[in-house]
Image: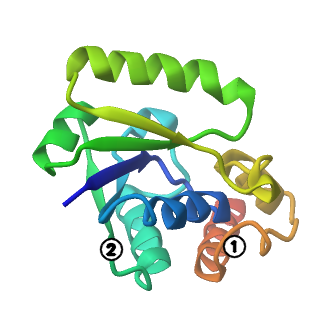
């Protein structure tokens, strides 16, 4: 079984992420969306919330599962018997950073391949950071995230503004 890991903070999951996930299902038998525990990014959502949001978003895709991980990605890839990592590239500016990560992962474990996928052109401008900023400023993010993610964003931002 060909398995790929799609890692990220997914804070929050966007339609661009979903596009990459859906397209990865065409290339791999199993796609594991791996939510990173990286708390140094100071996420809006807790790890459990991000995992729940991803799980809800992919429940209609039988070959996709959501999980979380901490530590080295290549160790997680090995622990899940995966063959590859998939990463989304929105623009050329993403490439240098992603290329460095891919080379480092290869140095740490040469058996793990990295596959770069571009989202549909309608999502090339989309990032979790931009979605959070639009939502914080009262903008409509319904075109950028699944409905349950939009609802969770609004709930978080109401609590944040009351604090």
Q: Can residue 22 be seen in this view?
A: yes
Looking at the image, which residue sits at the far bottom?
60
All told, the count of numbered labels is 2
x%, y% of residue 42? 51, 40
148 to 123, vertically: above or below = below
Asked if the residues shown at circle 2 and circle 1 are in contact, with their CB atoms under 8 angstroms apart, the answer is no
- In which quadrant is the C terminus drawn? bottom right
x%, y% of residue 159? 63, 68
Q: Is residue 154 left or right of residue 76?
A: right
x%, y% of residue 142? 78, 75
Neighbour tally class for label 1: few under 14, some 14-19, many 20 plus, Cα within 10 Å: some
Of callouts 2 and 1, the N-terminal one: 2
Image quarter of residue 20: bottom right
Identify the residue under disc 1.
Answer: 154
60 to 2, vertically: above or below = below
Image point (63%, 75%), residue name: 155
Q: Is residue 2 left or right of residue 119?
A: left
Neighbour tally class for label 2: few under 14, some 14-19, many 20 plus, Cα within 10 Å: some
Q: Is residue 98 left or right of residue 70?
A: right
Image point (72%, 62%), residue name: 161
Image quarter of residue 49: bottom left
Identify the residue under disc 2.
Answer: 63
């Amino acid at each position: 079984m060909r398995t790929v890991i799609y890692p990220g903070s997914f804070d929050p999951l966007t339609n661009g992420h979903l596009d990459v996930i859906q397209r990865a299902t065409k290339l791999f038998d199993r796609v594991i969306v791996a939510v990173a525990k990286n708390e140094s990014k100071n996420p809006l959502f807790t790890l459990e919330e991000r995992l729940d949001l991803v799980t809800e978003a992919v429940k209609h895709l039988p070959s996709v599962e959501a999980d979380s991980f901490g530590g080295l990605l290549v160790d997680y890839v090995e622990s899940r018997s995966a063959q590859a990592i998939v990463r989304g590239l929105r623009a050329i500016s993403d490439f240098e950073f992603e290329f460095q990560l891919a080379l480092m992962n290869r140095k740490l474990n040469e058996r793990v391949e990295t596959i770069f996928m571009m989202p549909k052109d309608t999502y090339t401008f989309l990032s979790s950071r931009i979605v959070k900023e639009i939502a914080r400023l009262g903008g409509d993010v319904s075109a950028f995230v699944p409905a349950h993610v939009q609802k969770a964003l609004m709930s978080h931002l109401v609590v944040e503004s009351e604090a």
